[in-house]
Every structure is written in C-alpha cells, then in structure tokens.
Amino acid sequence: MIPKLKIVPLSSIVPMMEYSETKVKYIQEIIESSGNIGTPVSLVDLPDKNFLLLDDSSILKVAKDFDIKFLPAQLTNQNQIMDIRAEIFIENFKPSLIEEFISIFPRVAAIYPSRKEIKQYQNQNDLKIVFSGKKEKDIIVCFRNLNSEMLPGAIFDFFDYLKRSCRMSRKIYSEKIRTANIRPNQNYWSFKIAGLNFNHIKAAVASQKYFPAGLIRFDYKCRVIGIEYPIKVLNERVSILKKNDFYMIW
C-alpha cells in the first residue's frame, strides 16, 4: 500500500489529546536547528471534512507558536487502524485519590479491587479504568455509561482531578522498556482504559473533550517517518497544490 501524503491546513486538524510540554520543547528544538518538520503528522478523515490527529496536540501547539499554517500529513482511514491502546504512567499516585473522587461523585463511578467483582457490577456500556501498581493489586474504577457510542463525561473530570496531584507520562511498552528511563525496582503505577474504541474518541472530540497527552496510541499500517518538510516551503504564499509538489520527489 502506498502511503497518502498531503499538505493540510492547520485549521482543519482536530486534536483529541492535550499537548506535552516536554514534547513541545523537543519539536521546537528540531525546527530551530533544522528548519524542517521531521515527520508527517498522522491524520484520519472526519465526516465534516476535517482531520483527526492521531497523536497528542504538541505539534499543533508548536505550529501556532511558529505561525505555521500548514502541516505535512499522512492520511489514513479508520479501517487501517489495527489496534488502539490507551495506557499511561502516573507518578505521585495514591489510591486514596480514587476514593476521594468517588466520594464527591458517588453516582458516576464505583471502585472494585478485583476483576471478578467488576464483572458482577458492570453493564455492557460501562467503561472501566484499570490502575496497576508494580507491587500492588489492580484497582478498577467503573464509570456508569448509558450509551455505547459515547464516553461518560465524568471520566474527563476524573483525569482533571488526578492531574492536580499526579504527573502523567506516555506508557513505555515492553518492546521499548530498555530505552526508557525507568528503574527496575521503582514502584510505579499506570492506568489504562479498557475497551476504548474509535467511536468513543470521535464522540469525545465532537464534545471538545480532550484526553491526557500520551494516553492513546494507534497501531496502523504503513507509517511514514523520516520525510522532512522545510518550514519555508510550508510558509510560501502559493497554493496547497504547489506545496504538495514537494512530495513528488519521493
């Protein structure tokens, strides 16, 4: 399959995750040193002719800061997405934070210490977040949900509540664990959203609800990397068709 590369207006790109300050700084340094966008952003078509960004919104933040109005993109479609993983590390986490949140919103969520118990409570539309500690038993938080195509709004309130006390960072999967700056004996926590699907994500975007930066990761076919696009070409006062001519050399 030949990847579809295209120049896309920044105004038509819709974010689904917040930006990461660390990643923003990293992208800024690359642009300042090379004058290029290092890799095309990954986008999926939306029904309203906009595009969903399959990453956090760090690149959008940088583009606005540098007054870049177009971005090089790789366009894909929903059928090419093979897997969606929603998992993230969380630092300074204490289980008492979950109990505090549920005491404030007892009607929207429940907590269970085991997978067996959660099955007895959960209906088919409810969404669960699983907290895993290296030396602790899993903690499962179940959010009541009446619509299988939507996400409960309380889940975003929960993210905001956690971020007041905790720092979240992108989950490093086992195949890359050796490159991560994580000590083997460190007692860390992570959490994942079980059963998150593309319809949930689109519904959240439509409601302008944003997931934490780095939470969601997509596995899809034919990812393009290493094609640098000069900022000066992106900013030229020519048509998008002319800007797209740059890709004709690849």
Image (tube, rainbow, N blue to C red):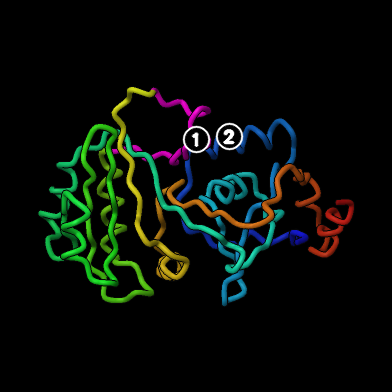
**Residue 12 visible in the current orientation:** no
**Residue 103 visible in the current orientation:** yes
Q: Residues within 10 Å of mark 2 (few under 14, many from 20)?
A: few
- Decide: marks 1, 2 in contact (CB < 8 A)? yes
Counting from the top left corner in percent of width and height, residue 176 is at 52, 34
Specify the amino acid type for callout 2. Tyr
Instruction: Give the residue at mark 1.
Output: 22
Q: Residue furthest front?
A: 116
Q: Residue at x 82, y 57 (%)?
A: 243
Q: Nearer the viewer, residue 99 or 32?
A: 99
Quadrant hosting residue 183: top left
The residue stretch that appears in magenta? 166-183
Left or right of residue 18, residue 26 in this image: right
Check residue 170 for magenta coloring: yes
Q: Which numbered circle lies on residue 26?
A: 2
Q: What SS does tag 1 mark?
A: helix
Specify the amino acid type for callout 1. Thr
Counting from the top left corner in percent of width and height, residue 88 is at 39, 44
Q: What SS does tag 2 mark?
A: helix
